[in-house]
Amino acid sequence: MAKVKKAYFCKNCGFEAPKWLGRCPSCGEWNTFTEEIIARESGSVAATVAGPLPTAKPQRVKDIRESEHVRIDLGNAEVNRVLGGGMVPGSLVLVGGEPGIGKSTLSLQIALAANGLKTLYVSGEESAEQIKMRAARIGIGNDECLIYPETLLENIVAQITEHRPDLVVIDSIQTIYTDLLDSSAGSVSQIRECAATLLKYAKSTGTSIFIIGHITKDGAIAGPKILEHIVDVVLQFEGDSNNIYRILRGIKNRFGATFEIGVFEMLDAGLRGVDNPSEILLTHYEEPLSGIAVGASADGVRPYLIEVQALVSGAAYGTPQRSTTGYDGRRMNMLLAVLEKRVGMKMFQKDVFLNFAGGFKVADPGLDLAVVAAVISSYYDRPVAEGVCCAGEIGLSGEVRPAPRTEQRISEAARLGFKRIIVSGYLAKGGKRPKGIEVVPINSIDQLPRALFLEAL
């Protein structure tokens, strides 16, 4: 007979305690302990379900042979890019994101991709009929995709063992439970043990597993923090449900870099990868408009150009308003203070509204110059010269510092046909510059108006 055990688990970090504690000694959070009833057979859950791993012996570092992993093409260029060129066999990938952001759509598209893989799509949230309706909308390209609505871990592992798929998709880990534990699905112990079981099975058989995870109201992946430590790759699906663009960002990757991003557009037929984000973030106008500037940004190693829109008007109610969309409001206030101190613009009398095209949320300090350029253009009601973009960070003393990966930003601006780019004068000399674009260096913010309008104000 199984031995029944009661324990208290921290919902934030998964710390286990024999009694209730007001404050977690591991992560320091208050009121996060919940009681769970655990019933364990002899041995661990992972060992019971997944079976034993082959024994290994210690080896010298120089004696270990490196093996070339042939990555699995998931049939989605943007997901392959974020993973570092494809999915490594035997890896465990965790994807988190807001409700309704498109996690299930993305995972089903991967399962249905016509790339010759035998896939098993396990859904704990939807019936087979619901999945078929979404699959018909997306388009079925893989006849070897198996749909399996199930939440019991033992049944899932049995079906994986029987069908031997190349790729397994679990939607979602919070709905899966094992009979070896008495706690409910989604509890700290269930999530931890189910993830450990799936990891052990993936490593022992070489089966790649794609897991969908819920997130909390704070944006963190729900469940114990150890879930993110167990898996090989953690991806974050970002975006606003009111906008059509989504970003897939790598948070952790044991097989590649974490500075790649994938950009998607949500359509009626599912998510479409965006090869060139600059095309969707730039708007073409019939005539120049004031308050609009183009900034050369870089998210990880991927450069793109984005349109910055600013509106500066007189403060009608005494206290000036400051409103931003997709940008840190405190950083905008800092840039406005620098403009007032170093350039002499009376910003304390003005309302300032700032917006980024496409609903993107940007935290790149290299866009400081573009933000200030849009504010200056709206303040004087003069359009920025045609074919001009900016890339630079602004300090409190008004100096313009080089933005990270400035050379890549310059190359992206040249590729899109821009004639001039304003950068920091402190940028290292000697870099190879593309043809067809003039690089204008400035050292301080008071030199920016002349560079923007090609003449003094």
Image (cartoon, rainbow, N blue to C red):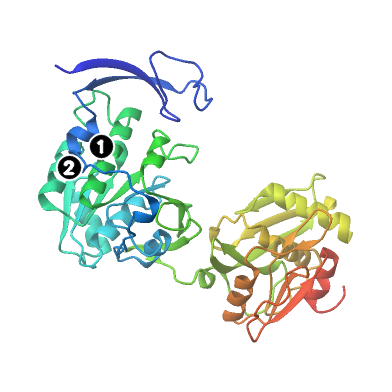
| Crowd around label 1: few <14 · some 14–19 · many ≥20 (10 Å) | many
Vertical comparison of 111 with 377: above or below: above
Mark 2–mark 1 distance (CA, rounded to whole Å): 9 Å
In this view of the protein, can residue 345 be seen by the observer? no
Tag 2 secondary structure: helix
Q: Tell me whether the residue at label 2 lies in contact with that at label 1, contact meaning CB atoms closer than 8 angstroms.
A: yes
Vertical comparison of 330 with 224: above or below: below
Q: Position of residue 119 (x, y in %)?
A: 20, 57
The C terminus lies in quadrant: bottom right
Circle nearer the N terminus (2, 1) = 2
Image point (49%, 25%), residue name? 26
Q: Position of residue 152 (x, y in %)?
A: 19, 36
Image point (21%, 38%), residue name? 151
Q: What is the number of the mark on residue 156?
A: 2
Q: Could you tell whether 343 is left or right of 59 in the image?
A: right
Q: Which residue is mark 1?
A: 176
Q: What is the number of the mark on residue 374?
A: none
Q: Position of residue 251 (x, y in %)?
A: 47, 50
The N terminus lies in quadrant: top left
